[in-house]
Structure formats: C-alpha cells, structure tokens
Image (spheres, helix red, strand yellow):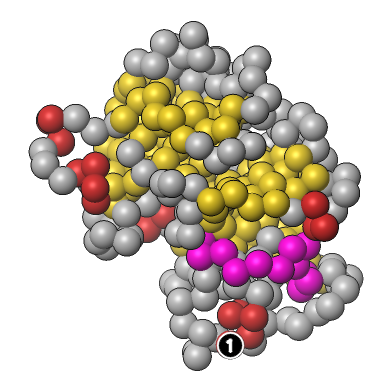
Amino acid sequence: MFPRFVDGIRPTVKTRTLLIRLYGKPYLRLDCGLGEAPFCDDSNILRFVDIVKQKFHKIDLGKGPSSHEVLDLEDAVSTTADIIGSKEDIVVGAKKGYAVLNQSTGKLRYIKKVWDKRDGPGKEERMRCNDGAVDSAGRYWVGAMNDPKVQEPTNEGVLFRLDSDLTLHRMVENVTIPNGIGWSADDKVMFFIDSPTKDIVAFDFDASTGAISNQRVFFHVEDEEAVPDGFAIDSTEHIWVAICGGAKILKVSPQGMLVGEIRLPTRMISCSGFAGDNLLITSAEEPEPDRHPSSAEYAGSLFMVHVGVKGLPSNKFRMS
C-alpha cells in the first residue's frame, strides 16, 4: 500500500543513516502516459513532456499550477534543452533524432536524424529518443531505444553525442533503455544509466573532447521489481534518481552510498529535476491498476518536494 497523505511531506523518519521522507499530494494532478524531463529555465518556467501522449507541458512556477499550458506535438519528444541565444526555440530528442521545438507553437524541425543506411531498414520506425543532457561544452547527449509502441526494448539502443557543428557521435552502443545522464561538479566524471542493468555507471570524462572511458559501476539499485530511471544532481553532488516501479526517489551520495529516500504515492516514478531548492518529479501511467489501485490514483502526476538544496547549474546547447 502507498501512503495517502493530503498535505505534502510528513515528518521524516530516520533508519540508521538513511533519511526517508513520505510525500503524498501532487503539485499538479495529471494523467501522463509517460511524464519525463522536468526542467526549469532561466525565467522560472517549468517544462516537461509526455512521451506517450505526445504533449509538451509548461508551468510558470511564480504563478503556480493555474498557469499550466499544454501543446500537442507531431512526434514523441522525450528530452529538452535550452539553446544558447534562443528563448522561443529549444532543442529536443524526438522520435527520429534531434529537433528544434518552438515552445509557442509546438512545431518541430529536425536538425539531425540519428539513423542511416548502416542501421538497416526499419530502425527509424522502431526506435525513439529517450533521456538526454547537455555537457559543459554545449554538446547534447541523448539516448535512443526501441519505441515501446512498436516493440519491446532490446539492446540495440545507442547513447549519442551531438556537437555544436551537428557532428553526431555514437558514444555507447548495445544499451536497452538509456536514462539518467549527468556530470560531476569538477567535470571529470559522467554518470549514465541503462535501466535494466539497475546500475548507475560512471565514466572518466574529458570535457575538452567529450571522450569517455573507464566505465565502472557507481551505484546498484537493490530492488527486484524496479529500475533506476532519470536523475538530477544537486550542488553537493548527491544524485536524486527516480526508481520506476518503486514509488520513490533515492538520494545517492558522491561516494555512491544510499543516504536518503523520498517515498511517493505512485509506483512509476520517471524523472527528477531541480527548480531552486525544490525537486520536481514526473511519473507515468500505472500498468497494473487492478493490482495497485492506490498507485493508479496519482499515476502520471507531477510532484514537487522541498529538499533544501539546489541543483548543479544546467548547460545549454551550443549550436553553430
């Protein structure tokens, strides 16, 4: 069963060194098929997407939930990033690759499709982009996976890197559900998740070239029925990772230790992102509503939890 709270965070519970917060009320009650990519821009506008229902959501956090707006999209969009020098247009990972999205009209314009002849017939149709993030040099890293609307995910996914001159690089191959991309504060380590492995892995990162090396496991999720999904990194370098199927966010220390947990009233937690010292959390549809009716009640909603720490500064895509 899930806690049925109506007034936000209850008093914390300490179990040895693990700090647990129980949270129940959504910031915005929705029915997203797959809410993802919560991101707060320089104007305090929160945006996020619904990949499955092809929606683009925006909220002015200064005005609150009443300012919620939704745009219909012509293709599924899964990740977004600001572009240096642009306010209306942002860059996104979409069904076929990288595109520019106008935030007022919802119109998409592809700037780099990611599949070519080497991939054989049908790959563009059976794949879509998933999670993504921009590094300190303005390069946009986006993972691609099998589109669940077409087929079950296999390990033919790829983690791509798009440079400012629109040169495309295949950085990690043979992944299944690429998620959670981010960097340490000193820019020497990149973190990445392939969800079915249940691992957050770390790479040595060369910020000058964008090269990665020396892959190793940083943190492993010990949950038989759940997997790590998207994450955000705070200013103290703790990782706040969504546990899809587990109804929670885990807080992982810079040493790779579990030090905190936010429990939520729906199982399919998908991603997290910072807005000031609040954590915004997206969720997805409950796949087994008869078995988990309490989870289904708030499935697909957006949550906001005050965590008392800000996120690391986000980077913008540098497009030549």
Coordinates of residue 104 in the picture (x, y in percent) = 64, 37
Q: Residue furthest front?
A: 105
Q: How many marks?
A: 1
Give percent across and percent down for residue 16. Answer: 75, 66
Does residue 26 show up magenta in the picture? yes
Q: Nearer the viewer, residue 266 or 122?
A: 122
Name the residue that disc number 1 marks: 293
Which residue is pictured at 80% across the width and 45% down the height? 60
Query: Which image quarter is the N terminus in?
Result: bottom right
> Where 312 falls versus 308 (above or below)?
above
**Residue kind at label 1, given as amino acid type:** Pro
- 189 w.r.t. 299: above or below: above
Badge 1 density bin: few <14, some 14–19, many ≥20, Cα 10 Å: some
* Mark 1, secondary structure of its residue: helix
Predominant SS along the magenta part? loop
* 154 and 255: which is toward the camera: 154
Report the residue at 24% width, 48% height from top: 125
Image position of 32 (left or right of 168): right
Asked whether 165 or 203 is in front, the reply is 165
User: Residue 114: image x %, image y %?
Assistant: 30, 31
Q: Which residue lies at the image location 65% right of the left edge and 67% below the top edge? A: 30
Magenta segment boundaries in residue numbering: 22-34
* In the image, residue 77 lies in the stretch drawn in magenta: no
